[in-house]
Amino acid sequence: MAPPAGQIRPAKYLGAFVLIVVALYSLVFFTGNGKATPKLGIDLQGGTRVTLTARAPDGQTPTDQALNQARELIETRVNGLGVSGAEVVRDGTNLVITVPGADSEGAKRLGQTAKLNFRKVVGSPLPNAQPAPPSTSGTPAPSGSNAPTTTPSAPPAGSETATAPTTTAQGRPAPALEAQPTTTTPPASGTTPATTTSAPAKPEVDCRKVFNGEYSEKAEDAISESRACRQDPSLTTLDAQTVQQALTAFTCPAKDPLLGNDDPALPLLTCDQKSEFKYVLAPVNPPADGSVKDTDFSLYSRLTGEDIGNATSGTDPQGAGFIVNLTFKGEGGDKWGKFTSANVSQQVAVVLDSQVVSAPNINEPIIGGNTQISGKFSQKEADGLANVLKYGSLPLSFEASEAETVSATLGLASLEAGLIAGGIGLALVFVYCLIYYRLLGLLTILSLVLSGAVVYAVLVLLGRWIGFTLDLAGIAGFIVAIGITADSFVVFFERLKDEVREGRTFRSAVPRAWVRSRRTILSADAVSFLASAILYVIAVGQVKGFAFTLGMSTVLDLVVVFLVTHPLVAMVSKSKSLSSPKLSGLGGAVQAGADDRAATAAGKSAAVKEV
């Protein structure tokens, strides 16, 4: 039979709390690294500050709108797995990212443009190696002009045709000149070749230098040079031999200006992320002139990151390592099905920021709107890639121009001073509770200690699971939450005193006081939690961490009040020795109630005598 309203079985509630504590600390000590230490924020443990320099696709100065949008997206990535304690601040045309720890590479990845598309692989990829000497067949060779030529083995004497095309005035290697006519006989003496009769509209680009990784210092010029040489429209119309010549001539650049700036409507000559292999890739989208039918997916995938509905990381079911699972949205799944159906036994490259992540073979049509990206990822790399793909690409490309380590000396000094001040304040609260509430004050101290134990365990687990980091702002949130927790005890105890003043015993007053104070406690904590939630939504950086810790502590406050404080008070009220008014701290309330009743009785007696 259920007990009356307000009556509880204390052992049942305390047992539930003990199970919660045991479960939390079992997870703390027997999962992860097994260390009961929380992750500290940058102001407590030091960290890394990375400055990202923005580059617009056309090399011009980025707009304010694009920079603000990029900052918001990077903030979303930073907090994609929870509160990480990182900050993203705009400084002119730069974005400054500050993250806890010494993972500068992780901070740089936050600025990844994340422009994803799927391109068909043209020809066969080649390993990235230094090109052979100029005299070797199939590599660029200098000629009498500033434009290199690609020359296979020389034809025998008397040959009627030349087998190697020459290059354009821009200096592109053989792929760029496939459409340029060649002559069967040398021109007559004094004859000027037709190609020299008109001046080029743009400055000449020496693709020999581009293919060797030499670019102009100015970002705009470097991007233009890369597009001119590595995104030649004729790359997809050349024969296999010429494509292989282009791959042989090309060397993966150490610093690629085309990173995140390639044109999806043009072919692409690029490398994988580790610069191990070189690829010629088909355009993503067909020409806009209608020359390609909408149903023709033999060359164009028409798939970009905008077609992705969700991205998650997981273990590779076919071997070691991790993969990224993609779910297409809208027409994306239909496009993927048509493209894979039209390119069975072909390679498709998953291209992220102009670099190939993986290039698997299509063994069969993939219908259903789901696919995987596998690239021998570590768990951290797979999580990071899924995170950036989930929240979309940046409107700008970035390069890390500066990375520095931030010292935690100042933060630790501030922490020490704050803990000393907090300890003094907490000690005064304990002394006041013991003097004013006596035994109930002791229950308050015990509840606060148990609340702190639960909060600490949750703090360690959140740092392990979602990357939550404890900083000075978070500690401030916990200190404020101590006041909220103590306020819940005060509401309950004061309601208990009111019941005792009305003439009820300690034992009978507890259930009535709990029923009446419970609604007030829930209302107060709900208001505090809503304020924390609103602050978390609109705030950034450390303020967001403050709001998170305050809200979390408020929820755990309810757990402690319902499962610890109330059951302990109920147990004390049933003990004859512990429920003594002098020991319990209710003596004043008992005396005040007796005085009130005596005064009321005396007033009634005087009124009767007067009558």
Image: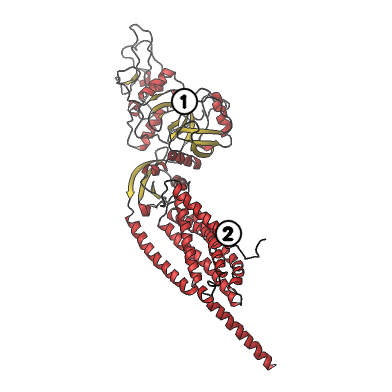
What number is the disc on residue 12? 2
The secondary structure type at the circle numbered 1 is strand
**Mark 1, other Cα within 10 Å: few <14 / some 14–19 / many ≥20:** many
Q: Residue at x 40, y 23 (%)?
A: 176
Looking at the picture, does residue 13 appear above or below residue 289?
A: below
Nearest to the observer: residue 151 or residue 11: 11
Q: Amino acid at mark 2?
A: Lys
Q: Quadrant of the C terminus?
A: bottom right
In the rendered image, residue 65, in percent from the top left (x then y), is placed at 46, 46
In the rendered image, residue 289, in percent from the top left (x then y), is placed at 53, 27
Residue 203 in sight here? yes
In the rendered image, residue 386, in percent from the top left (x then y), is placed at 48, 39
Q: Residue at x 45, y 34 (%)?
A: 321
Nearest to the observer: residue 36 or residue 238: 36
> How many numbered tags mark residues here?
2
Q: Quadrant of the N terminus?
A: bottom right
Looking at the picture, does residue 97 appear above or below residue 124?
A: below
Q: Residue at x 56, y 29 (%)?
A: 366
Instruction: Judge from the rendering whether residue 259 lies leftward or rightward of residue 500; answer left or right.
Output: left
User: Which residue has dot 1 on it?
Assistant: 121
